[in-house]
Amino acid sequence: MALAAVLSAKHKLNLLFESSRRRFYWEKMSFIHYRLQHLESVTESRASMRGRELRFDPLEQQIEDAANKIADLVESRRASDLQSQENPKDDDDDDDNPFFFRQLFDLGEELSSFSEKIRSELPTTSKEIEQAWNYLAETSSTICYPRVESGELVGLKDELRQLTNWLTGGPDELQVITVAGMAGIGKTTLVQQAYTRPSIVSHFDTRVMVTVGPKFSLQELLMAVSNNLVVDLQVHSKLSDRELQSHVCRFLEQRRYLIVLDDVWHSSVLFPLEECFPKNFTRSRIVVTSRVNRGAPVLKKGFLDDEDSWRLLRRMVFGQDPRESCSFELEKVGRDIAKNCEGLPLAIVLVGKLLCRNERAVEIWKKVAEDENPLGIGIDSDSPISKSLSLSYGMLFRYLKSCFLYTGVFPQSYKIFTSELLRLWTVEGLVTPNRWPQEELSVEETSELWLDKLISQSVVLAQKKSLTLGKTKACRIHVVFRNLCISIAEKEKFCHVLKKYAYSFPRGTNHHRRLCIHNNVMLAIKEVRSTMESIAFVRSLLCLGLYHSYPLRIHLNFGRLEVVNALTIRFYTFPCQILELVCLKYLAVTYDGELPNSISRLRNLEDLIIRRHFTIKHPYGAVYLPVSTWDLKQLRHLRCRGFDLPESCTNSATLEHLLSVLGVTSCSCTDGVLARIRKVRKLGVRIELAPGKEETFQFLGNVDRRLRYLSSFKCVVSGLNSRVVSEVPDFPQYVRKLTLSGCKLPWKSIAAIGKLPFLYVLKLRCNAFHGWSVWEPCDGGFRRLESLLLDDMNLEVWISEHSHFPRLKRLIIRHCYKLHEIPLCFGDMESLEMIEVEDGRPSLAESATHIMENHRRKFGCHHLQVIIHSSWGDKEKA
């Protein structure tokens, strides 16, 4: 984590330069900035050389400690400056706390010594660099883990059918497919079962299967392929790489061949092999198994469902002998154990072997079910699964490792919303825009790219996809990776997780910079609060346990806190300690009362998330944030369900950095308010209507006129017996994503939406439109629409032509029980990639199937995916 700590210290130093009025700061502290910059460069070079090494590095720990000390000093100075801004001193006061500069100077000398030491370690020739990489590859390649025997796996039927159809069907030219998935998911077993099927054996003239692994040697790989093709290996061992390539190519030229490259880590493996495998028209195939998803075409190896997980665990413990029986009590606990493995075959197999070594007693099995880490997964463990997972972690780029560890601090089965995770990465200093070669990328864009990289490496799992250009809306981390993350985070002082009172604060906890509470009830224990008070280095407090609606005392006197995430704790009175946290950047709390006007003291605040509990009946009408909210000049994201932005008292009050505003009502959409938040890109409005009241949506005119950067707009109306408006609203013309729910707009308004020139995503939910239940789009509408969602709509008849949605890629229809069918002309849309139908008439699902068949007949391709969900079972057609 040394590189992350250096980047964080450098970032905080830059913030001090920007926010301070003291001009002499740059003169006195430019030396520390230069040495941080130099140390960043050499540390990154060293990281690239040692990127795959998993051993503990004392020098890296020393660098991290020194960088953290610098960050603490700078933050302390910055906090003092902010507190004294009401009574500013002379800007040219050079004699300002010389002890502070003395400490910085000493730390700067320490950084310089680290830089020199690293420079002496770095290889000076390309040969030395190559030798270093080879050494690291060899140490990584020695990590092995047990393969699951083909007879032990269940739940492969559908995937095996897809892979077999791809191998034996399709065009005549050579094709390559990647079977991707996380470690231990059964990629190799799936391919082996297809590889040995009689239909595959008879279909191909030649079959070769070789294991590549992290250590890639072109000569060894060519020798392995050649060894599978001919018997006399000694003759070919004397050939050069070029001669081996020619030999393999000549042998395969007139044959229909199947090449399986197992466990590929680098895309560079495939490039030198292109000359070996002739691109003939004999319907030859190449299959690659990898933990890395390199894009289409990819067959993603999925997890087992709960039933298949139990079947596999039962087979591991009791075998296939029908005389072996499992009691009802054991089966009940066994199903919980299997479910805890979250569908990972390798974990189920290893847990099964663990159960086999113990007595088949309910009490013993219950202990395994209650243990969050029954396999003892950890960075210091020698178990095969720990080594396999550690290899995935070790192969990550250094700048991704901190981000990956951060995903592991969330509780088990926690649904991590991408927007929340990326903002925490940013305010924690884990993502900076200069860490990406393309300088035009913002911090938000860079963090999205980094998350995509973690997902493509199969260490983070995409749980829910957004309709917006296929971005990840929610993600999660598998339980086995989470156990590894917690182990690494504790060892590297990245984070301490607090869940149980016993051993809640082990030795060394006072040096951790993040404190995560997974059990909020712990805050009610006096001894726990007392111990928390002694932890001086905490910069982030994350209360992520189950929601607790009763009052809890929470210690917030950490003077340099930057992140407070306490949405799962209900505050009955606003905690005044928060107002003293002048370094705070991220604040998320649940509170029903009015915010104090002194909230303006949090001048570094970038994210403000206020949620109301709503146990008491919420009165209709606006509840405003304090006027001093306009003084939070660094604010970038505001989510305040139940609160509204007030009108400013001065014309100069603006929030220039504000990018998103969610949860407000139409009272926040006045011309005066919107004129002061012109750069907002995402706006979410929630309107609660009293019985019989009508919403005219006149505020949309102000939104269209003032928010020219707006790309996403969401409007949700709730309330009993609300009336239906008759006029057509002025929808924001520049919006790219539009979500409507409960608005009860007239169906004629859909024509105005179709004319929005930049609309890419449209989501229509319950009662978005009301009245006439026939939809016939107008010609020339929805010219750029790529994603359409219809959820719980009263639509009965949909009349359309293929020209109405010329760019549509994704169509999702959920709970539209009155809709008879999807227009069959959708089968004429070449751009269409996915249709999803959830719980509707049988005729609706049948129309989706007909569309897929027509699409394939017309375009001759299989990229249209049809997914049908129903209450009695799911079905997927690819």
Image (tube, helix red, strand yellow):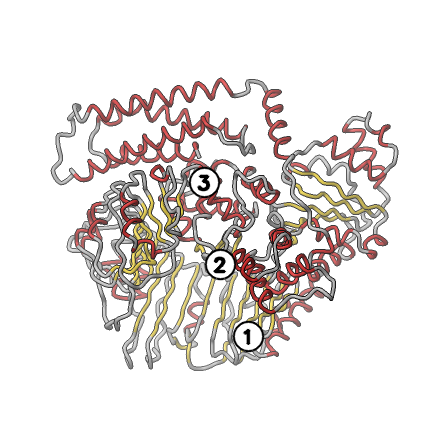
Position in image of residue 788 (x %, y %): 51, 66
Looking at the rendered image, the quarter that the N terminus falls into is: top left
How many callouts does the rendering have?
3
- Res. 426 image quadrant: top left
Residue 732 placement (x, y as % from top left): 37, 62
**Residue beneath the point at 54% across and 58% down:** 340
Kind of residue indicated by mark 2: Ser
* C-alpha span from label 2 to label 3: 25 Å
As shown in the figure, which amino acid type bears the numbered disc 3?
Ser
Question: Residue 62's spot in the image, x, y percent?
Answer: 41, 27
Residue 839 circle label: 1
Q: Is residue 174 above or below residue 413?
A: above
Work out whether residue 364 or residue 464 is closer to the camera in this orientation and state it: 364
SS class, disc 2: loop
Q: Is residue 392 left or right of residue 17?
A: right
Q: Mark 2 packing: few (<14 Cα in 10 Å), some, or many (20+)?
A: few
Q: Is disc 1 placed on a helix, strand or loop? A: loop
Q: Residue at x 81, y 46 (%)?
A: 207
For discs 2 and 1, the disc positioned in front in the rendered view: 1
Residue in front for this viewpoint, 320 or 214: 320
Return the residue at label 3: 402
Mark 3 neighbour class, 10 Å CA radius: few under 14, some 14 to 19, many 20 or more: many
Placement of the C terminus among the 4 image quadrants: bottom right
Does residue 709 appear in this view?
Answer: no
Eye-nearest disc, 2 or 3: 3
Amino acid on which the number 1 mark rests in the picture: Asp
N-terminal of the pair, mark 3 or mark 1, is 3
Q: Earlier in the sequence, mark 2 or mark 1?
A: 2
Label 2 sits on residue: 466
Residue 783 drawn at (x, y percent): 51, 62
> Foreground: 732 or 489?
489
State the CA–CA distance, disc 2 to disc 1. 20 Å
